[in-house]
Image (cartoon, rainbow, N blue to C red):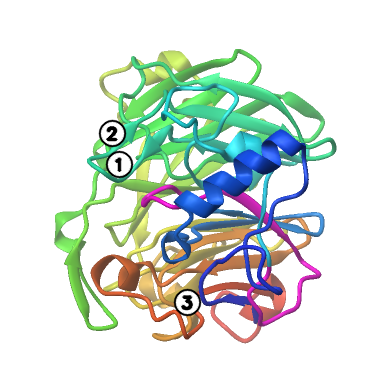
């Protein structure tokens, strides 16, 4: 169901805006100055959503000027079907760009999506990039980890240039961790620009990368026609989803490029081995498990571990679909759960929280890029559904 609707984001308006908590007089002055001179409501297009104990963490990547904060939150108690006030997370100072766009490791430049791990830590990639005026790499991309119990940053890992040069291809992160061994976490980071899968070890504070042909986009599925807008994309590996653990502690790791109708899998044992990343021939480490069918290009996907059902966004048809992992990965075993060419344009983020609730962000991005948004209608929506309720009576159901 539709939980939150937004036309566009303003600030300090009655129930419809971006608001920032009071911090200090100096920061309030800095905040007011930045907002008054650099805030462009139209350019604030939300991309990601993560539910964290009564908060929805929402991202606005800096793909255009005039964005006060890339990381924000709203309360789940905000009035439904309204444009709720945004607040910078964890605070405005961390989100504010340096006045001269100088590198500053205490600041966040641009974030696409966040994820909460089993240890109640929020992970995200700061791309370090302003994607306008020719693309400006303000600082090295970095991995951030925030303890959501205290809202304090507990780790910032600067990604070395030997791993990747541009940062804006790392648009999501998936965290593989046992809640009984939080220090043993691994982060899997798809890179849609350079077609690589990066792995970060929390324990080793070290990163390595895999390359494989399966990470590339499929040129046969790069043409899109959505709400009358025709365009061509070449996004490679885009989303990573985790399956249930095997008795040996490892698990299947599912992934797909956005420009593709195929799904692939690799065992986490392979990804967690830096030595394996250095092999020139992976033989059968990476496997294709099947195809979804025509016009099933997908951005994000996530697997509900309790039911074994995978949910995925369908960017070519403005919808959300599912697949039961107990069944073969063939078109007949997929169900289109919901689609709407007005209210669900570009489902750019999707994830299942620990309570078995599916969250989806739709943001009309294709209209923003190739046409224009109408500020008089709701352009951005957050959707939620109980995973068992939404698949009842479909091929995905138990």
- Element class at badge 2: loop
Q: Which quadrant is the N terminus positioned in?
A: bottom right
For the residue carrying disc 2, how many other residues have a C-alpha within 10 Å: few (<14), some (14-19), or many (20+)?
few
Tell me the residue at 48%/55% (across/down): 39
Q: Is residue 354 shown above or below 142?
A: below
Q: Which residues are magenta?
A: 61-84
What separation in Å lies between label 2 and label 3 (alpha carbons)?
Answer: 37 Å
3 or 1: mark nearer the eye: 3
Which residue is identified by label 2? 212
Considering only order in the chain, which callout, 1 or 3, is on the residue closer to the N terminus? 1
The residue under the point 42% across, 86% down is 342
Estimate the x, y position of residue 320 in percent, counting from the top left: 49, 73
Residue occupied by mark 3: 379
Q: Nearer the viewer, residue 329 or 157?
A: 157
Is residue 68 inside the magenta stretch? yes
Q: Residues within 10 Å of mark 3 (few under 14, many from 20)?
A: many
- Mark 2 or mark 3: name the one nearer the start of the chain: 2
In percent of width and height, residue 32 lies at 61, 48
> Which image quadrant is residue 28 in?
top right
Query: Does residue 257 appear anywhere in the picture?
Result: yes
Q: CA distance from mark 3 to mark 1?
A: 31 Å
Which residue does the numbered mark 1 point to in the structure image?
A: 215
Residue 172 spot, x, y in % from top left = 48, 44
Residue 72 shown left or right of residue 334 in the figure: right
Position of 259 compared to 323: left or right? left
Out of 243 and 233, give the one closest to the viewer.
233
């Amino acid at each position: 169901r539709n939980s939150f609707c937004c036309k566009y984001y303003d600030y300090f308006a009655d129930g419809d805006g971006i608001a920032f908590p009071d911090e200090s007089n100096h920061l309030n002055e800095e905040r007011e100055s930045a907002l008054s001179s650099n805030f462009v409501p139209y350019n604030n297009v939300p991309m990601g959503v993560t539910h964290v104990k009564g908060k929805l963490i929402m991202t606005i990547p800096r793909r255009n000027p005039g964005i006060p904060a890339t990381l924000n939150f709203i309360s789940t108690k905000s009035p439904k079907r309204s444009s709720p006030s945004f607040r910078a997370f964890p605070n405005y100072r961390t989100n504010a760009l340096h006045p001269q766009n100088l590198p500053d490791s205490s600041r966040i430049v641009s974030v696409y999506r966040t994820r909460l791990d089993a240890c109640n830590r929020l992970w995200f990639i700061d791309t370090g990039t302003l994607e306008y005026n020719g693309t400006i790499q303000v600082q090295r991309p970095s991995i951030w980890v925030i303890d959501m119990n205290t809202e304090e940053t507990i780790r910032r890992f600067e990604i070395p240039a030997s791993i990747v040069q541009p940062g804006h291809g790392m648009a999501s992160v998936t965290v593989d961790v046992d809640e009984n061994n939080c220090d043993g976490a691994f982060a899997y980071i798809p890179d849609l620009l350079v077609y690589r899968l990066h792995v970060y070890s929390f324990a080793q504070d070290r990163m390595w990368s895999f390359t494989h042909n399966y990470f590339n986009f499929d040129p046969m599925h790069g043409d899109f026609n959505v709400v009358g807008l025709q365009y061509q994309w070449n996004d490679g590996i885009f989303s990573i989803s985790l399956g249930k653990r095997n008795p040996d502690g490892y698990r299947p790791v599912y992934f797909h490029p956005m420009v593709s109708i195929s799904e692939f899998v690799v065992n986490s044992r392979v990804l967690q081995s830096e030595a394996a990343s250095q092999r020139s021939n992976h033989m059968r480490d990476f496997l294709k498990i099947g195809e979804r069918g025509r016009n099933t290009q997908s951005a994000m996907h996530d697997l509900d571990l309790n039911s074994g059902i995978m949910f995925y966004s369908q960017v070519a048809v403005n919808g959300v679909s599912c697949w039961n992992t107990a069944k073969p990965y063939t078109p007949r075993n997929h169900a289109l759960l919901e689609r709407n060419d007005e209210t669900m344009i570009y489902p750019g983020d999707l994830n299942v929280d620990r309570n078995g609730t599916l969250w989806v962000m739709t943001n009309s991005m294709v209209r923003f890029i190739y046409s224009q948004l109408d500020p008089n209608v709701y352009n951005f929506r957050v959707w939620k559904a109980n995973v068992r309720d939404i698949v009842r009576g479909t091929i995905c159901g138990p």
